[in-house]
Amino acid sequence: MSAAEGPLVVGVDTSTQSTKALVVDVATGEVVASGQAPHTVSSGAGRESDPLQWWDALREALHQCGDAAREAAAVSVAGQQHGLVTLDAQGAPVRPALLWNDVRSAPQAGRLVEELGGPKAWAERTGSVPGPSITVTKWAWLAEHEPESVRATASVRLPHDYLTGLLTGLGTTDRGDASGTGWWASGTEAYDEEVLGHVGLDPALLPRVVRPGEVVGTVRDSDDLPFAKGTLVAPGTGDNAAAALGLGLRPGTAVLSLGTSGTVYAVSTRRPADPTGTVAGFADARGDWLPLACTLNCTLAVDRVAALLGIDREAVEPGTSVTLLPYLDGERTPALPHASGLLHGLRHDTTRGQLLQAAYDGAVHSLLGALDLVLDEDADRSAPLLLIGGGARGKAWQETVRRLSGRAVQVPEAKELVALGAAAQAAGVLTGEDPAAVARRWNTARGPILDAGERDEAALARIAGVISDAAPLLEREADQR
Ligand SMILES: Nc1ncnc2c1ncn2[C@@H]1O[C@H](COP(=O)(O)OP(=O)(O)O)[C@@H](O)[C@H]1O
Ligand SMILES: O=C(CO)[C@@H](O)[C@H](O)COP(=O)(O)O
């Protein structure tokens, strides 16, 4: 038995690069055990992962938690948003999942926007103007390119639904993750039958959207899972909504998350509907909203530039007048799905460290451009930005965000805020508490604050100028990957 003060819960983050599991003491928030196992993502034209690999990674991560997982009274799974998981009648994947950062469905996204009333109508209807990340565009792409896969599909899931379903044997999702599909109407909080009809997706193939705080079920009897009989399963949610829970986020505080994706978001009590498409009007996992902007190129893109330069990711040097747009995967914010990376302003005396700094600047510029848009008008813009995700551990990331935002930056000591948010959700179904209040009780946002400095307006203007001047190049269909 562990020496925990309270009951134990398990929180899972199945994100793009890996699955992480934490066993957490409900009384104190102490992480008593943890595990992590990697995933692979395809390279080339698309971005796909085998859902069975997520399941193997989950079991491996739980296995690493040892006996502590066996003592858990509840579990919750949070996961990368938007991925299209197609299952056959036996519940086996029909094909690999199409991930959030797969931009092949850009043409389908453009067509769907036009066919169903334009950007404003979509924003008002679903909260978001669908770009290629949004699940409905992936289904449309599949219908066009692999009709046989669509015919073989007996159920459609998001990554977190898929794993929750394997735990419980039931088909469920939550409002947070459903709001990133493009087939969930944010006004009525129900599946949008007209959108579904338009793309030929039978609503019967979709999971039931459970209420925040609802017990989804219990873990099914299985030898390959380390849970005791009767372990409760919480709804789970998308990874960004889970991190919001994990921080105990209140309206008005902005979060910048630096992982495979870069995201900037805040909790809002007002339903968002941005017709420009920059802000996605997601629901959160409680009953509020989560206006969010997301980039496709964040830690992986900057690490790739460091590797190309042959230097450490921290080996940045100041004084750069080079602009590097690190759009290695195309980009979502700004909406340039066909773009590739672009370098401007190279001189004889430019150093490798300055080139690397330019990559950080390019990645952070995209996120900060959306910062004001995700905050309500009455938000306190002098409050520190919360910096989370794997990149938040890096000094170069911290300093770049501080310099380009001009704002104070708080870096929570807690490393796995998505998994902690899932754990808080699991605690919520156990005790009846609000998960965000659980996280506040755990003091998960605690961490050092880096002071605000002067905002580097010159760098921001230079980068914006290059994006604008290079528009024809960035918008052009790339010469295929
Ligand atoms: N100390 C560090 N400094 C900078 N970046 C880091 C550090 N540790 C991890 N990372 C970056 O964090 C990324 C993983 O972040 P994470 O939030 O776990 O991603 P995801 O949730 O998308 O799988 C890696 O791509 C890596 O580049
Ligand atoms: O698409 C989005 C948000 O809309 C991404 O934030 C994904 O949810 C992937 O998250 P990470 O794996 O980068 O955490």
Image (cartoon, rainbow, N blue to C red):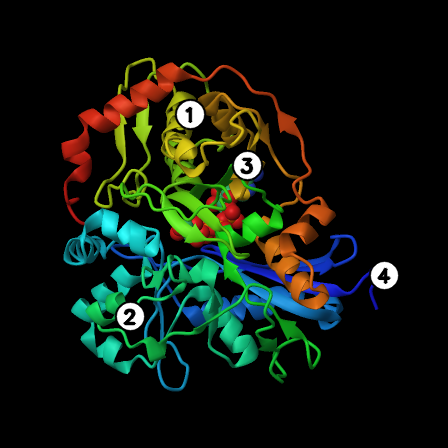
- Answer few, some or many: residues within 10 Å of disc 4's Cα (few below 14, many 20 plus, some between 14 and 19): few
**Of the residues under marks 3 and 1, which one precedes in the sequence?**
3
The quarter of the picture where residue 344 lies is top left
**Of the residues under marks 2 and 3, which one precedes in the sequence?**
2
Circle 2 SS class? helix
- Provide the residue designation for mark 1: 357
- Distance between the alpha carbons at the discs numbered 3 and 4: 35 Å
Query: Which amino acid lies under the numbered mark 3 shown in the image of this protein?
Result: Thr
| Image side of residue 82 versus residue 442, left or right | left
**Of the residues under marks 1 and 2, which one precedes in the sequence?**
2
- Distance between the alpha carbons at the discs numbered 2 and 3: 35 Å
At 67% from the left and 58% from the top, the residue drawn is: 34
- Answer few, some or many: residues within 10 Å of disc 1's Cα (few below 14, many 20 plus, some between 14 and 19): many
- Distance between the alpha carbons at the discs numbered 3 and 1: 27 Å
- Answer few, some or many: residues within 10 Å of disc 2's Cα (few below 14, many 20 plus, some between 14 and 19): some
Task: Report whether the residue tagged 4 is closer than 8 Å to ligand 1.
Answer: no
- Distance between the alpha carbons at the discs numbered 2 and 4: 50 Å
At 39% from the left and 46% from the top, the residue drawn is: 272
- The numbered mark at residue 193 is 2
Query: Which amino acid lies under the numbered mark 4 shown in the image of this protein?
Result: Ala
The quarter of the picture where residue 236 lies is bottom right
Q: Position of residue 204 (x, y in %)?
A: 35, 80
Q: Position of residue 151 (x, y in %)?
A: 24, 80
Q: How many marks?
A: 4
Vertical placement of residue 327 versus 365, above or below = below
The answer to whether the residues at label 4 and label 1 have Cβ atoms under 8 Å apart is no
Mark nearer the viewer, 2 or 4: 2
Residue 110 visible in the snapshot: yes
- Provide the residue designation for mark 3: 253
- Provide the residue designation for mark 4: 3
